[in-house]
């Protein structure tokens, strides 16, 4: 029965109107999806287009069977939306789920089952698999918790940085600190990253891109290979889009899920570091017709997924199913999801995995103007966040340079990666394209793009070889994945520098580290937004595995002992990141240089603007007037990919200016690769480029 005293304190408009299963209820707030805590109750709102009935199930924490079943009355339905306020609930005492009734016709894509327990698609916290690596017990199902949203963000403003001013550091939440060498108190968690913020500041990056943090089940597809337990380590199989992965927390967060993550984001912001989330809207963990029914299949299978005419799943994701992103209902969910992470978690940007899928029609065909991509580009709440597309998918759609962008979307520039890998290992035939990629890929990013803010330049990322492995292996070595070394790409464009894998050969090792310095120097001197994979700055290795998606072990974890062992490489990364920050002429066009040098010039073997397919020594000149410092900013990048010495001539300067070398990846014979202001590094005009080396010059020693 309803307590009269408590009822008197409830506004008249929210008085209970009836009882269901012993709970006082009333019609809810239909435009608030999910479960929302109110002053005197909880609002539950859910929708199904083809379902004919819906029940709310309440469970005791970790209970197997619901202790209460509350059918939604037809009077509590508007359109296709069911909504009900249930009064008197203590959110710390229950978990919830749904059951939806409706037609069961797999050929038509309808999979309704009135006995199937379903996770709320808008769940803010997911329970059922919260301890990393521990699989749910048989018979358990995913359920949701109501989250108390009382985190105080204060008056912290959004970041106003342009994309080209970022240096992005891609990392895996668990792998970043899971290794015993990390030295953190809470390895493999959000708290572990928090403990490493001083390191990130020392390195100099100003944005972290986190591999998936939405709730996923790493035990899905778990197996054992050679005595090693393999998991879905990367996390690209989303269970709940609105819920943080509870396996990444250091402590239990019942009904305050997300607090540790929010605290991490706030602290990163306080230290000048933006947070970009790697989001997976191209598929879900429900897989194909053989996969589990977790949520979307049971609410509206034929709406949430792209289906063939006979009810099977299109698989443009390579993971069993494909989310039907341009259906209005799915569009709405994705927009609400991104708004939620932007407002409630203050996320600065999103990288969209296999983003070309987001531009496919319901039949899988590519659309000229995909409504979802346009909607995200112009959404008011998302107006300041970075939108980054992985502009391809597993169905063969490759859109680097043609992705529908509306001057808002940036891209992972896969052509930059492929071309620079080829050129830096001696592929002189790629020189002409390498010049275009280093100078901002103007051939790709104009018109509907936003120029230099559109290209995210990278040579390595989570998917493929680490930077060390790129120059330590000619071939992938994925035997530990259990697929006979058939998984992972064969198009690595790598070079082992003379020995496959581990070696004690000093000449080979010296060359490998020079090649890594070359890659870093070129990346940091390229127009666009540089991104590199965590651990590359100190030579972390995955032992030749270029598809470590299932390796929750030392193959994927960062070995922090290498930081001390390869400190010279780390210091080189630090120097180049700082150098990029201090030279805006690299990042964008500046007002005309007082000294008269052009804003951007490319030099090849034949001189100015004479780059051909045989160019081994490539030069890039950036110049402009830096108003902030009140002086010209001039940088010259020289790249020799040839295996012999090459003499280069630096561009002619006015008499009152002189060139100074600030970087030489071949070193000066004293293990120095970078030169500080005041050091004797003046260059009159000619410079001897040592084999396979990169040099960087400025005028009058400006660093």
Image (tube, rainbow, N blue to C red):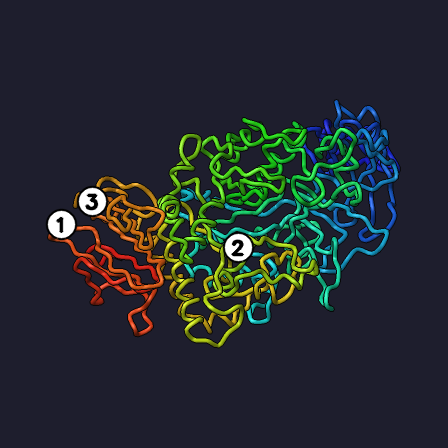
Residue 211 x/y as whole percent: 58, 52
The tag earlier along the polypeptide, 1 or 2, is: 2
What mark, if any, has residue 597 been given in the picture? 3
Q: What residue lies at 86% left-to-right and 45% top-to-bottom?
A: 66
- Label 1, secondary structure: give it: loop
- Label 3, secondary structure: give it: loop
Residue 586 x/y as whole percent: 32, 48
Mark 2 nearby-residue class (10 Å; few <14, some 14–19, many ≥20) = some
**Total residue callouts:** 3
Mark 3 and mark 1 in contact (Cβ < 8 Å)?
A: no
- Label 2, secondary structure: give it: loop
Give the residue number, with chain letter if any, for mark 2: 492
CA distance separating discs 1 and 2: 44 Å
What mark, if any, has residue 654 been given in the picture? 1
Mark 1 nearby-residue class (10 Å; few <14, some 14–19, many ≥20) = few
Q: Could you tell whether 209 is left or right of 527 in the image?
A: right
Q: Could you tell whether 370 is left or right of 671 in the image?
A: right
Residue 414 x/y as whole percent: 49, 46
Q: 336 or 72, which is in the foreground?
A: 336
Mark 2 and mark 1 in contact (Cβ < 8 Å)?
A: no
Nearest-to-viewer mark from 1 and 2: 2
Q: Quarter of the image containing the N terminus? A: top right
Q: What residue lies at 45% left-to-right and 66% top-to-bottom?
A: 497
Residue 332 in sight in this render: no
Corner quadrant of residue 426:
bottom left
Corner quadrant of residue 588:
top left
């Amino acid at each position: 029965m309803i307590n009269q005293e408590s009822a008197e304190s409830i506004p008249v408009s929210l008085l209970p109107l009836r009882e269901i299963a012993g709970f006082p209820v009333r019609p809810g707030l239909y435009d608030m999806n999910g479960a929302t805590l109110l002053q005197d109750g909880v609002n539950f709102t859910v929708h199904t287009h083809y379902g004919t009935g819906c029940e709310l199930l309440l469970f005791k924490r970790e209970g197997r069977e619901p202790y209460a079943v509350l059918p939604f009355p037809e009077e509590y339905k508007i359109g296709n939306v069911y909504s009900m306020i249930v009064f008197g609930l203590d959110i710390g005492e229950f978990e919830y789920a749904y059951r939806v009734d409706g037609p069961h016709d797999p050929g038509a894509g309808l999979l309704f089952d009135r006995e199937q327990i379903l996770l709320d698609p808008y769940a803010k916290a997911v329970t059922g698999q919260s301890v990393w690596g521990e699989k749910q017990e048989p018979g358990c199902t995913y359920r949701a918790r109501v989250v108390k949203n009382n985190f105080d963000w204060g008056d912290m403003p959004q970041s106003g940085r342009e994309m080209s001013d970022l240096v992005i550091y891609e990392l895996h939440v668990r792998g970043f600190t899971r290794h015993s060498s990390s030295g953190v108190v809470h390895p493999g968690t959000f708290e572990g990253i928090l403990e490493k913020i001083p390191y990130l500041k020392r390195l100099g990056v100003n944005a972290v891109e986190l591999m998936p943090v939405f709730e996923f089940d790493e035990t899905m597809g778990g197996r054992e290979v050679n005595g090693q337990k393999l998991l879905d380590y990367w996390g690209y199989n989303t269970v709940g889009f609105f819920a943080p992965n509870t396996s990444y927390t250091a402590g239990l967060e019942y009904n305050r899920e997300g607090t540790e993550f929010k605290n991490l984001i706030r602290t990163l912001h306080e230290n000048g570091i933006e947070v970009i989330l790697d989001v997976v809207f191209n598929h879900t963990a429900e897989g194909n017709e053989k996969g589990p029914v977790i949520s979307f299949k049971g609410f509206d299978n034929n709406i949430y997924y792209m289906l063939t005419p006979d009810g099977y799943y299109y698989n443009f994701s390579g993971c069993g199913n494909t989310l039907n992103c341009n259906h209005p209902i799915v569009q709405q969910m994705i927009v609400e999801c991104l708004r939620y992470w932007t407002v409630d978690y203050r996320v600065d940007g999103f990288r969209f995995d296999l983003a070309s899928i987001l531009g496919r029609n319901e039949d899988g065909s590519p659309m000229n103007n995909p409504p979802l991509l346009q909607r995200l580009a112009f959404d008011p709440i998302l107006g300041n966040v970075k939108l980054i597309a992985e502009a391809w998918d597993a169905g063969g759609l490759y859109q680097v340079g043609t992705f529908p962008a509306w001057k808002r979307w940036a891209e992972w520039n896969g052509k930059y990666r492929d071309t620079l890998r080829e050129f830096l290992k001696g592929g002189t035939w790629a020189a002409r394209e390498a010049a275009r990629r280093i100078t901002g890929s103007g051939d790709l990013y104009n018109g509907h793009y936003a120029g230099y803010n559109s290209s995210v330049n990278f040579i390595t990322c989570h998917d493929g070889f680490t930077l060390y492995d790129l120059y330590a292996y000619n071939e992938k070595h994925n035997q530990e994945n259990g697929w006979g070394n058939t998984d992972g790409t064969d198009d690595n464009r790598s070079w082992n520098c003379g020995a496959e894998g581990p070696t004690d050969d000093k000449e080979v090792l010296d060359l490998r580290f020079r090649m890594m310095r070359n890659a870093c120097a070129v990346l940091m001197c390229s127009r666009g937004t540089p991104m590199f994979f965590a651990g590359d700055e100190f030579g972390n290795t995955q032992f030749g595995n270029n598809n470590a998606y299932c390796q929750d072990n030392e193959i994927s974890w960062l070995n922090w002992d290498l930081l001390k062992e390869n400190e010279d490489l780390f210091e080189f990364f630090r120097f180049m990141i700082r150098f990029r920050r201090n030279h805006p002429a690299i990042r964008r066009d500046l007002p005309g240089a007082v000294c008269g040098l052009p804003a951007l010039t490319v030099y090849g073997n034949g001189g100015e603007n004479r780059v051909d397919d045989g160019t081994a020594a490539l030069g890039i000149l950036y110049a402009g007037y830096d108003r902030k410092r009140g002086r010209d900013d001039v940088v010259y990048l020289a790249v020799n990919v040839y295996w012999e010495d090459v003499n280069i001539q630096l561009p002619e300067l006015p008499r009152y200016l002189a060139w100074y070398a600030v970087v030489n990846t071949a070193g000066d014979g004293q293990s120095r690769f970078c030169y500080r202001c005041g050091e004797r590094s003046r260059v009159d005009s000619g410079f001897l480029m040592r084999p396979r080396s990169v040099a960087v010059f400025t005028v009058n020693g400006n660093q």
